[in-house]
């Protein structure tokens, strides 16, 4: 284990002010760890035991403060797209021509979108990458209702009237209860 790095000049006063401005309990505790070292010279093991944390966590926060300054103690948002192929803007730009096709009423198929995605990246990607990109941009799968291309609505209605079929397909489909013996 190396020697402890000295705290910056005036750190105790600045940290005391930061304790008052803390926006969350986690942020308060990070500042408190460094403030205790600056004012009392406590070591990480003692602080960790008193505050219920691991000594390595306390050391990590203190070392980062000495190395990078006060901003490291502030609350940092977690999460994000760390392993993305394209930024959200690049994805939007890539999908723009396909959006135009969709607005014209054409069917957009995922295979050409995947081909464009792979051409831009220069290497193949799994199809789920493309589907997730489409989902992030607000696309959803909309399919036309299955219907025969030569279907005639008037002929279908005429057939329904002539056959006497109810909404379920047979004349008896709408009945409830036992069959009437006189129907047989």
Image (cartoon, helix red, strand yellow):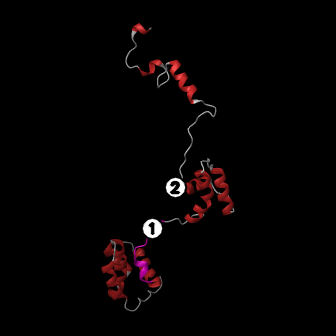
Residue 41 drawn at (x, y percent) = 35, 86
Residue labelled with disc 1? 78
Residue in front for this viewpoint, 10 or 153: 153
Magenta part of the chain: 69-79
Q: CA distance from mark 2 to mark 1?
A: 23 Å
> Would you identify the image quadrant in which residue 11 lies?
bottom left
Residue in front for this viewpoint, 54 or 89: 89
Residue labelled with disc 2? 138
Asked if residue 20 lies left or right of residue 100, the reply is: left
> Would you identify the image quadrant in which residue 61 lies?
bottom left
Residue in front for this viewpoint, 180 or 67: 180
Q: From the viewer's perspective, is residue 11 above or below residue 137?
A: below
Q: From the viewer's perspective, is residue 58 above or below residue 109?
A: below
| Residue positioned 45% across, 81% down in the render | 63
Q: Quadrant of the C terminus?
A: top left
| Residue positioned 45% across, 21% down in the render | 173
| Residue positioned 49% across, 66% down in the render | 80
């Amino acid at each position: 284990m190396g020697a402890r790095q000295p705290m910056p000049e005036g750190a105790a006063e600045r940290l005391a002010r930061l304790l008052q401005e803390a926006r969350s309990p986690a942020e308060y505790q990070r500042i408190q760890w460094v403030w205790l070292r600056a004012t009392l010279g406590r070591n990480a093991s003692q602080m960790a035991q008193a505050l219920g944390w691991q000594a390595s966590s306390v050391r990590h926060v203190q070392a980062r403060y000495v190395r990078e300054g006060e901003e490291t103690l502030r609350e940092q948002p977690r999460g994000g797209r760390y392993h993305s192929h394209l930024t959200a803007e690049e994805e939007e730009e890539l999908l723009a021509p396909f959006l135009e096709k969709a607005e014209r009423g054409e069917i957009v198929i995922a295979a050409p979108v995947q081909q464009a995605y792979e051409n831009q990246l220069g290497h193949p990607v799994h199809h789920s990458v493309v589907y997730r990109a489409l989902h992030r941009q607000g696309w959803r799968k909309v399919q036309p209702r299955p219907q025969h291309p030569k279907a005639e609505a008037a002929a279908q209605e005429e057939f329904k009237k002539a056959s006497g079929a109810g909404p379920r397909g047979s004349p008896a489909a709408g009945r409830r209860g036992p069959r009437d013996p006189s129907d047989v």
